[in-house]
Image (tube, rainbow, N blue to C red):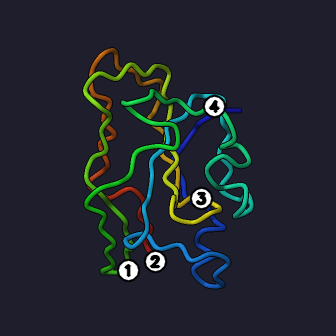
Amino acid sequence: MAWATSNISAAMVSNFFAPAAALTYTGDTVNVALYNNSVTPNKNDTFANNAYAAGTWAGNEISQAGQWAAGGVALASKTNTFGSGTAQIGAANTASGNNATLTAVFGCLVYDNTLAAKNAFCWNYFGGSQSVTAGTFTVVWSGSGILQFTIT
């Protein structure tokens, strides 16, 4: 099985209620790593396996030195909002250098690069294969944020 949807790590949500790691979205460096279609994201995997270079995220990363580094690109202008029962994290669109050649990019992992364990906040599926040749690869975040959940 491969990518099918975007999601958040259930262990990350659980961590807010019984902290196993000090995930701090706005205070820490949060990176975006790109992946091919050989990963199988699992929202119910352990906190340790929903982390950069662990579990399904070990291998299958797409990168290019000087353009979109291995380990990802740091998010800029991060936001964390809550209102009317909706919690959301967002950031400015994330772009590569202007001479990137990246092929068969199916999605990304958004993770806390400050923590030694590199725990994930979420992953985002791009709806299919995305590529760029000698240009800029940009992840355009939704107006609803990088991740959002509503309490009803």
Residue at screen point 67% across, 35% down:
59
- Binning the other alpha carbons within 10 Å of mark 4 as few (below 14), some (14 to 19) or many (20 upward) gives some
Residue for badge 3: 118
Q: Are marks 2 and 1 in contact (CB under 8 Å)?
A: yes
The mark that comes first in sequence, 3 or 2, is: 3
Q: Amino acid at mark 2?
A: Ile
Residue at screen point 38% across, 56% down:
146
- Binning the other alpha carbons within 10 Å of mark 1 as few (below 14), some (14 to 19) or many (20 upward) gives few
Residue at screen point 45% across, 52% down:
31
Q: Nearer the viewer, mark 4 or mark 2?
A: 4
Q: Amino acid at mark 1?
A: Gly
Q: Amino acid at mark 3?
A: Lys
Q: Position of residue 148 (x, y in %)?
A: 41, 64
Numbered badge on residue 69: none
Residue for badge 2: 151
Q: Are marks 4 and 2 in contact (CB under 8 Å)?
A: no
Q: Nearer the viewer, mark 3 or mark 4?
A: 3
Residue for badge 1: 85
Q: Are marks 1 and 4 in contact (CB under 8 Å)?
A: no
The mark that comes first in sequence, 3 or 1, is: 1
Q: Is residue 6 above or below residue 137?
A: below
The mark that comes first in sequence, 3 or 4, is: 4
Answer with left or right where residue 45 lies relative to residue 115.
right
Answer with left or right where residue 16 lies relative to residue 69.
right
- Binning the other alpha carbons within 10 Å of mark 2 as few (below 14), some (14 to 19) or many (20 upward) gives few
Separation of marks 2 and 1 at Cα, in angstroms: 5 Å
Residue for badge 4: 60
Separation of marks 3 and 2 at Cα, in angstroms: 27 Å
- Binning the other alpha carbons within 10 Å of mark 3 as few (below 14), some (14 to 19) or many (20 upward) gives many
Q: Is residue 140 above or below residue 122?
A: above
